[in-house]
Image (tube, rainbow, N blue to C red):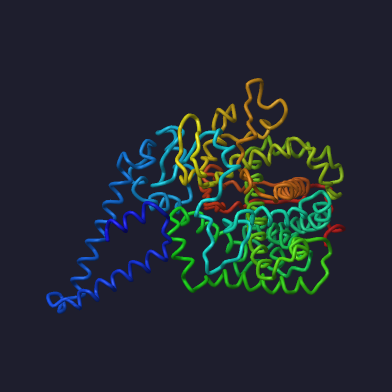
Amino acid sequence: MLQASWAIVHQRPVRGDWAVLLLLAGFAVQYCLALSSEELRHHALSASIVLYRTYLLSLCGTTALYRLSPWHPLASYPGPWQARVTSLWLTCRSLRGQRYLLLDNLHRRYGPFVRIGPNILSINSASAIPLYVGMEKSETYRRHMRSPGFELFFKPAVTGQHRERKRIWAGLFTANGLSQLMPNLERRTLELMQCMERRQSQSERGLVDVKEVFSHWAFDYTTDVIFGGCNQFELMKKGDPCGLAVTGKIAFAAIDTLGTSPWIMELLWSLPVTPKRADTMLSLIGETVQKRLRLRPEFDDLVSYLLHASVDDEDIERDVYIAIVGGSDNIAVMTTLALYFLLAHPDYYQRLREELDAAFPDPTGSLPANDLAALSLLNGVINEALRLGTPFFLPRIVPKGGALLDNRFIPEDTIVALAAYSQQLSADNFFPEPAEFHPTRWLPDGLGPHTKTDKTVLASFTFGPYACIGKPLAYREMRHALARTVLTFDISLPPEFDVPAFRAGILNMHTTFFKHKLLVKVARRPGVKLESVYC
């Protein structure tokens, strides 16, 4: 029995929920056998427990020895011995939110290849990026069979499914599709300015948490993009008493952290319960989808493209959930980080204001997307915030036949993850001062004659077939919100704000959490009159 179990464990992946059922079934069989024995009948339960405990300890022990042995396929790759034994080592450290710092330290110690799990390698080499084009997502992204539908975030069960769904979404992000989304972006961003002023006036300290305001703005605009103006969320006006903006963040964080031990996620997927907040959000999404199906949208929204492709209602709801979380959360986070870095570096804040003032003499006028895209420093601020603020963990599976990378062979079915944070802060890719905020490094002259700015290693929107399809809209949103905010307000940090502590409190688990609020003082700039343009 031990030999058979060991062979199964090491020759094919075993689902966590199935493993528990098999273990329980095995114990039941053991107990029945004990009951049928004359010698063990009177203490069948205790005897079964002892025997099964011995079996489990033997299985775990031999598994650990094999994973530490020179016969394991990844034996030649260095890394902490605990990581070699169990994936729980990485899971526990991922839960702390600063896995990217741990991996960076491990690469400094062990080199470009580090074994961070029984079958997982972290790779700190730009040579790994082309490999992503031909790799599938790891089991971290596998959806449970209880929810057999498909959406872009999860690993497709059928080859080509992801590509087909992406094709359906693609119409929204064409030049024509994006142009239809811009008037609503202008309206929502002006509403954002109003929301900042209103919430600051309601605050006892006379400060506004821009992190929260950006989150509600991004949520409202993203639901407009999805539902064509038929949405009913309106977080900027109503607030977020149900925690809608954070529900998806928590779910994605759980998948990212617990998914490093896929068997844990499989057990959780099997539970017949759903957190209350998730139930509320899914219910509201279902109601809004049905409302949208009965109405004509103001423009071609995401639901329009899904309906045109004959996607069924249930799958539309799944796609909508992913679009809301993926489309709003990261935008809010990166706009928050961009403003934080600007406030922490007043010289760059002033330079950006001068660039915007020159381009838009009327601070209340429209902000054409093409004009914003032509502003070099604005783009540099956003790219620099993305570089410093997206330490993503992107596990992929090495395809059949293995892969050769930097003269090292990686066996097939190995899970590999690019050390994005290490690459984005490497002096080989970004020089000088790779850990510092310098948006001018993205300008043509950079930071001087020896500047290095390797745009190809920026992993903010990932690589290959799973690259983010919403990248063009994301840049437009960030440019618009940042430009309108800087044009409208004089913004300052309170004297007690701890700039280094805020950055040290950034936690990343696929999505980003902040330990500290970004409380600022906003004051309308002289001559800026928004009353006539407020909705």
- Horizontally, residue 349 falls left or right of residue 496, namely right
Name which quarter of the figure residue 346 lies in. Answer: top right
* Front residue (pair 78, 347): 78
- Horizontally, residue 139 falls left or right of residue 521, namely left
The structure residue drawn at horizontal position 37% and vertical position 46%, both measured from the top left corner, is 83
The structure residue drawn at horizontal position 53% and vertical position 40%, both measured from the top left corner, is 421
Q: Judge whether residue 208 can be spotted in this image.
A: no
Counting the numbered discs, the total is 0
Q: Position of residue 203 (x, y in %)?
A: 64, 61
In this rendering, is residue 507 above or below 294? above
**Which quadrant is home to the C terminus?**
bottom right
**Which quadrant is home to the N terminus?**
bottom left
User: Most extreme residue toward the left, as rendered?
Assistant: 39
In this rendering, is residue 339 above or below 27? above
Q: Position of residue 126 (x, y in %)?
A: 56, 33
The structure residue drawn at horizontal position 69% and vertical position 65%, both measured from the top left corner, is 235
Q: Judge whether residue 47 can be spotted in this image.
A: yes
Q: Position of residue 507 (x, y in %)?
A: 52, 50
In this rendering, is residue 347 above or below 392? above
